[in-house]
Amino acid sequence: MRTRPYLLICVAFLIICGVGLAQSFDARFAEGKKALDTGEFNKAYDIFSALFKEQPDNEKVNSAMGQAAFECGKLSHAAMAYERVLILNPKNDRARLELARTFFAMEQYDLAEEYFKDVLDREPPRLVRQNVEQFMAHIRTKTRAWDFWGRLDLGGFN
């Protein structure tokens, strides 16, 4: 019977520690978002990378890590993060758009175009559609094999 108070103390300690860990996760996530907002992209990337190691299936962490990685120029890391988001939530159109933008920045125009088309197929808001169409037009100019320009002048003398 004497072990019960110790058992209750142990359980209470574990519960308190668990709540503390959740708060510290939320606090670190908030710190990472603040770093993103203030342009401290490397700091944000380090924070989100550490959080990713703790919760690799967390959609918010992967999305934020993708954003930080993109801003740091770690484009392949950003692409992997956004791909994980889409695995976790195939309906996440923001991640689909960011993945397309990342592939565009990597000059992988075929992949970028594929994801941009997916975004357009989902009937995004007008401003998003306009931005995507601008990206698509830029892709067409980058991937066009031939570009013809010409001029014909006719004149005569008397």
Image (cartoon, grey):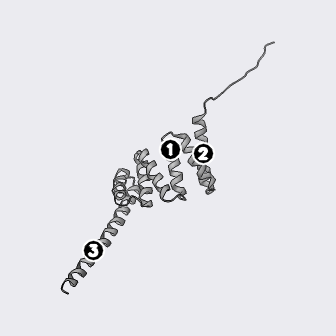
Q: Nearer the viewer, residue 10 or 127?
A: 10
Q: Which amino acid, mark 1?
A: Phe
Query: Which is nearer the eye, 17 or 3?
Result: 3
In the image, taking residue 28 as reference, residue 112 lies left or right, namely right
Which label lies toward us, 2 or 3? 3
The quadrant holding residue 143 is top right
For residue 138, above or below residue 55: above
Q: Secondary structure at mark 1?
A: helix
Place of residue 125 in the rendered image (x, y in percent of width and height, measured from the top left): 61, 57
Q: Earlier in the sequence, mark 2 or mark 3?
A: 3
Q: Which quadrant of the rendered structure holds the N terminus?
A: bottom left
Point out the frontmost of discs 2 and 1.
1
Q: Is residue 150 above or below residue 89?
A: above
Relative side of 90 to 38, left or right: right
**Mark pair 2, 3: CA separation:** 54 Å
The three-letter amino acid code for the residue at tag 2 is: Gln
